[in-house]
Image (cartoon, rainbow, N blue to C red):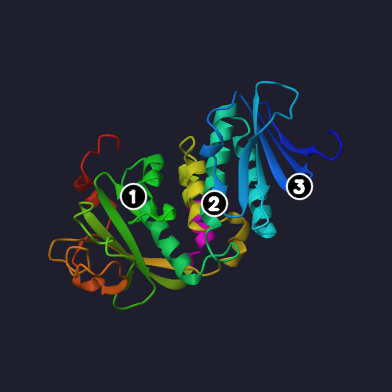
Amino acid sequence: MEGDQGWRVIDVARSKNGVIQAGRCFPGREESLLIGTRGLRVGSDTNLPRGQGFSVAYIDPVDSAGDWTWFALSRTSAGQPALFALMAEDLLALFAQAGGYDGERIRVAMLGRIRAWQDFMKRDRLGVLSPEAELGLFGELVVLRDIVCSGVPAADAVRYWAGPEEGLQDYLIGTGAVEVKSTVSPAGFIAEIGSLEQLDDSLRQPLYVAAVRFSLSPDGLTLPEICAELEAVFVEEAGSPLILKDKLISAGYVDLMAEKYSRRFLLQHIGYRLIRPDSPRLTRGNVPAPVQRARYSLDLEVIPVVASEFGAIFKSFGDVTTWS
């Protein structure tokens, strides 16, 4: 380093095909995590995650070998130090899992996780879901478990899960969708509908609402426990545990905050309700043209239950040739 310019780094983790270093770039002194992987660079900075309190950029190799690609994850002035530290700790844990991969797979896994953290940092709370969001995520995970139990390969099931990426519905399956609504109320089922498009079956067919009822009970599972249960299932398929972790972080859940979630949810019932042309709901096709957007409450009890498990409806989504 000449004068006070360039990188000052220390190794924190290393494998045959990957390296993680902690460092600062002078003169700016931005705290950074440097990730190096064996193999030549693919793509440009425009393909990298950006925003939400951190930046990612390719940098000149700092390793003596010339066939390595390096990028730096740096906290910006808008980034919260505590969240950046959580992200760095999680990336180190990911490297402990993925460090034995080839360089390209390590790079893809790391950038995928950083994108998940980008989604995570869009949320308001300091790493902890609100009680409502906790219940909602738990319901989505129960449906994910139900989909896998129906015979859908775990790697496919988690790719259908669009809720963490703020999809219109929580699961996008073929031309259809499943929107998950959860309650701990013992009677009735009033659901909050987020938009005019969410229950519009002219956009996706078939369209189901999975109405998931829980009770709060010491016999139930906490959010960290159902996450661990699903991870144990997903570990059976190569690569899918990492995809699940990425989705969970995008949804707002990180293992490092597990002690914050103590409520135990006991599943009482899942009711898959099919949206039909005569189902009560608001869509762009049935509200006055000047109405541009709407959020509303809907009594789901008036929409009949057509199934209590995903296996009874999965053929309605069309091509199932890749499923067992």
Name the amino acid, label 2: Gln
Mark 1 touches mark 3? (CB < 8 Å)? no
Report the residue that reaches farthest toward the right: 3
Instruction: Check residue 73 in the rendering and tell me which mark sits there, or answer none.
Output: none
Q: CA distance from mark 2 to mark 3?
A: 23 Å
Describe residue 71's horizontal placement relative to residue 192 as left or right. right
Describe residue 2's horizontal placement relative to residue 156 as left or right. right
Q: CA distance from mark 1 to mark 2?
A: 27 Å
Q: CA distance from mark 1 to mark 3?
A: 49 Å
Instruction: Check residue 118 in the rendering and tell me which mark sits there, or answer none.
Output: 2
- Provide the secondary structure element on which disc 2 rests: helix
Tell me which residue sits at (20%, 67%) in the image: 289
Q: Is residue 17 placed above or below 284 in the rendered structure?
A: above
Which numbered disc, 1 or 2, marks the residue that appears first in the sequence? 2
Which numbered disc, 1 or 3, marks the residue that appears first in the sequence? 3
Q: Which residues are magenta?
A: 220-229
Tell me which residue sits at (45%, 37%) in the image: 237
Work out which quarter of the rendered image holds the C terminus and state it.
top left
**Labels 1, 3: front one:** 3
Name the amino acid, label 1: Ile
Q: Residues within 10 Å of mark 3 (few under 14, many from 20)?
A: few
Tell me which residue sits at (31%, 59%) in the image: 179
Instruction: Check residue 147 in the rendering and tell me which mark sits there, or answer none.
Output: 1
